[in-house]
């Protein structure tokens, strides 16, 4: 790894690099076994993310849309129903306060509602050859696999935190890897929670 980083520093792709001690957030992600599942997702997500960003260079920024599909896939694979998913979004929202006077614009609610209403997973229409994210079904598969693993650990009493607390942490890390800012994360999480728990306040 050091040789590779030296090489891309020499070619000007990065300015410098520094070795640091990695400290996994084992408790936050639910214990040793759940951390292993998280690491598997981190590796797969990073690889697919780099491919996604390279393919999208110069085009529209669709990081928000794909992140909602991936996190929806993760939660559904973990066995969460709609209101349990709403609780996860609400947990994320509690760490990402809105910095606007009112709720997000109505068009944001429409987009989030549409993405959270589709059937998620690698076989979803969005990841089909004619879909908006064609070629990235394996990306969704990685999130689905992690969700299944977390559900299994939860069922066997092997998680050291609540399943929804762990999933909320995964959402935040997913967004951080995508480079979504805290204000954007706030809008997405508050909107998702509102759509599920307070649909009567939104003209969908």
Image (spheres, rainbow, N blue to C red):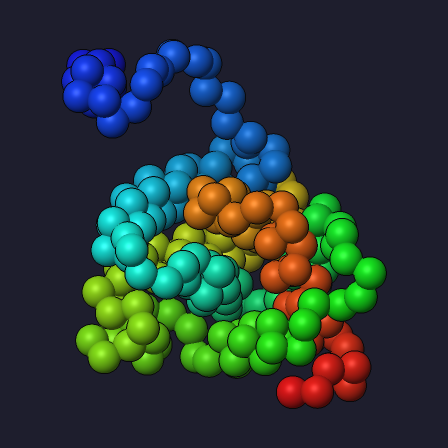
Query: What is the quadrant of residue 8 in the picture?
Result: top left
Instruction: Give the image quarter of residue 11.
Output: top left
Q: Is residue 162 left or right of residue 102?
A: left
Q: Position of residue 97 (x, y in %)?
A: 75, 50
> Percent x, y for residue 13?
25, 27
Depicted 203 relative to depicted 127: above or below: below
- How many numbered marks have been drawn onto this rendered protein structure? 0
**Residue 160 % position (x, y):** 62, 40
Which x, y percent locates residue 58? Answer: 29, 55
- Identified at 55% across, 52% down, the residue is 171
Q: Would you say 179 lies left or right of 129 here?
A: right
Which residue shows up at 60% across the image and 72% down it? Answer: 108
Work out which quarter of the rendered image holds the N terminus and state it. Answer: top left
Q: Looking at the picture, does residue 32 appear above or below residue 118? A: above
Q: Looking at the image, can residue 204 be seen?
A: yes
Residue at image point 34% right, 43% down? 46
Q: Nearer the viewer, residue 119 or 11?
A: 11
**Which residue is painted at 65% across and 60% down in the image?**
187
Quarter of the image containing the C terminus?
bottom right
Q: Nearer the viewer, residue 30 or 154?
A: 30
Q: Residue furthest right?
A: 101
Q: Establish if 24 lies above or below 148.
A: above
Judging depth in this view, the residue of 149 and 25 nearest the camera is 25
């Amino acid at each position: 790894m050091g040789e590779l980083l030296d090489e891309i520093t020499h070619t000007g792709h990065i300015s410098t690099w520094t070795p640091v001690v990695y400290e996994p957030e084992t408790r936050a992600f639910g214990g040793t076994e759940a951390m292993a599942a998280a690491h598997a997702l981190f590796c797969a997500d990073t690889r697919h993310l780099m491919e996604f960003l390279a393919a999208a260079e110069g085009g529209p920024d669709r990081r928000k849309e794909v992140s909602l599909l991936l996190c929806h896939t993760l939660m559904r694979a973990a066995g969460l129903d709609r209101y349990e998913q709403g609780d996860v979004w609400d947990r994320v929202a509690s760490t990402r306060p809105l910095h606007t006077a009112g709720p997000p614009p109505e068009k944001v609610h429409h987009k989030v509602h549409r993405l959270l209403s589709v059937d998620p997973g690698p076989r979803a229409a969005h990841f089909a050859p004619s879909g908006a994210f064609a070629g990235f079904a394996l990306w969704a598969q990685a999130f689905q696999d992690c969700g299944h693993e977390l559900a299994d650990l939860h069922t066997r009493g092997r998680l050291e935190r609540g399943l929804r607390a762990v999933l909320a942490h995964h959402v935040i890390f997913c967004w951080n890897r995508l480079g979504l800012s805290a204000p954007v994360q706030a809008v997405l999480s508050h909107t998702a929670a509102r759509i599920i728990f307070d649909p009567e306040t939104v003209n969908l």
